Image (tube, rainbow, N blue to C red):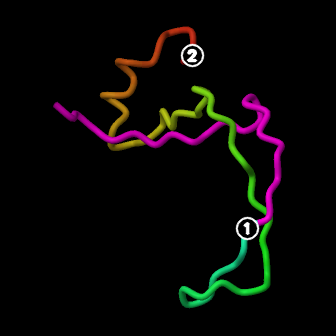
Amino acid sequence: DIICAVNIQHNCLDSQCTDIQQQPVHQERIETSRTKATVKHKSTPKFFLNVYSVHNYAHIQHVVPDMLR
């Protein structure tokens, strides 16, 4: 059963995501000649958990280990 939703963000710093690649920019579903730099994320289990989510705090605090509080 799903109890609540949580917000997590990939931790690029500790995952050492440093590879930058150029992606084409699309405008109205058409690829343009412009590009934008994007980070190629490494597949790691390192994430930030938003433990201060007000509406889910009671549920989140039960699963976060004491050493991380």
In what element is the residue under mark 2? helix
The image quarter containing residue 4 is top left
Q: Residue at x 37, y 28 (%)?
A: 60
Q: Which mark is residue 68?
A: 2
Residue 31 lies, in percent from the top left, at 65, 84
**Label 1 is placed on what type of residue?**
Gln
**Residue at numbered disc 1:** 23
Q: Earlier in the sequence, mark 2 or mark 1?
A: 1
The image quarter containing residue 2 is top left
**In front here: 15 or 65?**
15
**In front here: 45 or 21?**
21
Residue 37 lies, in percent from the top left, at 80, 64
Q: Residue furthest left?
A: 1
Q: Residue at x 40, y 39 (%)?
A: 6
Asked if residue 61 lies left or right of residue 30, the reply is left
Which quarter of the image is occupied by the C terminus? top right
The number of discs equals 2
Which contiguous range is marked in magenta?
1-22
Residue 5 drawn in magenta? yes
